[in-house]
């Protein structure tokens, strides 16, 4: 695993992307997606008391403490062979620890279930620092439109494995903090219009081209 070129600084926002090896489908159905979402919550903790697999077996024995998370999840989207996050690092090395623990745990589950061997994800996850509020909101639109761009759904709100419904206030979430985005709009409906609008979208996309990581 090579050295990371991007320094991950506490208090800063980053676009995070990781893909499966050779683009194989890893989020194959509801079970894999739900498991990954549950692991996202669990590994926000700075010091998880045990492995996620053990926690799931004896869930009543443990209490998840999210008072001082490693990162804040601003938005996310799980795609069949990769995932996107916008994260704000809250603790030193928080992003690295969160992504490493999350992907290692999921890879362990996947490899056992599907009798897979070797790494599941590409080496270092990709990370780019978000420098302006404008980049932050346009990146959120790009992430939330991923399932539409891939023809998985007609409308982003129809996709259950992203944070978009939280932004529309159609779902509650203990782990997603949409406020850095939504505070730049007068209402969630205005944000929805921003996402749905295709006018000048490709031109606006150029503003965050270096953040997209594709």
Image: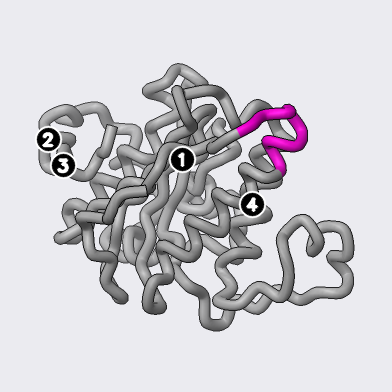
Determine the CA span between mark 1 and mark 2: 21 Å
Residue 116 included in the magenta stretch of the image: yes
Circle 2 residues within 10 Å: few <14, some 14–19, many ≥20: few
| Left or right for 78, reference 1 | right
- The location of residue 7, given as percent across then percent down, is 23, 64
| Numbered-mark total | 4
Residue bearing the label numbered 2: 206
**Which numbered disc flags the more N-terminal residue, 1 or 4?**
1
Q: Which residues are magenta?
A: 109-117
- In the picture provided, is 69 more to the left or to the right than 212? right
Crowding near the residue tagged with mark 3, few <14, some 14–19, many ≥20 C-alpha atoms within 10 Å: few
Disc assigned to residue 210:
3
Q: Earlier in the sequence, mark 3 or mark 1?
A: 1
> Does the segment drawn in magenta span residue 31?
no
- The residue under the point 37% across, 40% down is 143
- Distance from the alpha carbon under mark 4 to that under mark 3: 29 Å
| Numbered tag placed on residue 105 in the rendering | 4
Residue marked by disc 1: 83
Q: Are the residues at dot 4 and dot 3 in contact (C-beta closer than 8 Å)?
A: no
Query: Where residue 99 sits in the image (x, y, percent)?
Result: 48, 56
Name the residue furthest top.
Answer: 151
């Amino acid at each position: 695993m090579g050295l990371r070129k991007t320094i991950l600084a506490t208090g800063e926002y980053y676009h995070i992307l990781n893909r499966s090896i050779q683009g194989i489908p890893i989020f194959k159905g509801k079970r894999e997606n739900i498991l990954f979402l549950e692991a996202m919550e669990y590994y926000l903790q700075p010091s998880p008391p045990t492995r996620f697999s053990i926690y799931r077996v004896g869930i009543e024995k443990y209490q998840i403490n999210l008072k001082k998370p490693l990162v804040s999840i601003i938005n996310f989207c799980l795609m069949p062979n990769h995932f996107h996050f916008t994260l704000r690092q809250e603790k030193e090395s928080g992003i690295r620890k969160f992504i490493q623990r999350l992907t290692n745990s999921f890879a362990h589950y996947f490899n056992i279930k599907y009798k897979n061997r070797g790494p599941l994800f590409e080496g270092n996850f990709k990370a780019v620092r978000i420098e302006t509020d404008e980049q932050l909101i346009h990146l959120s639109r790009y992430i939330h439109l991923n399932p539409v761009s891939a023809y998985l759904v007609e409308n982003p709100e129809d996709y259950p494995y992203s944070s978009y419904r939280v932004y529309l206030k159609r779902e509650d979430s203990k782990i997603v903090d949409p406020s850095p985005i939504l505070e730049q709009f007068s209402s969630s409906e205005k944000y929805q219009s921003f996402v749905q609008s295709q006018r000048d979208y490709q031109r606006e996309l150029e503003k965050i081209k270096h953040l997209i990581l594709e």
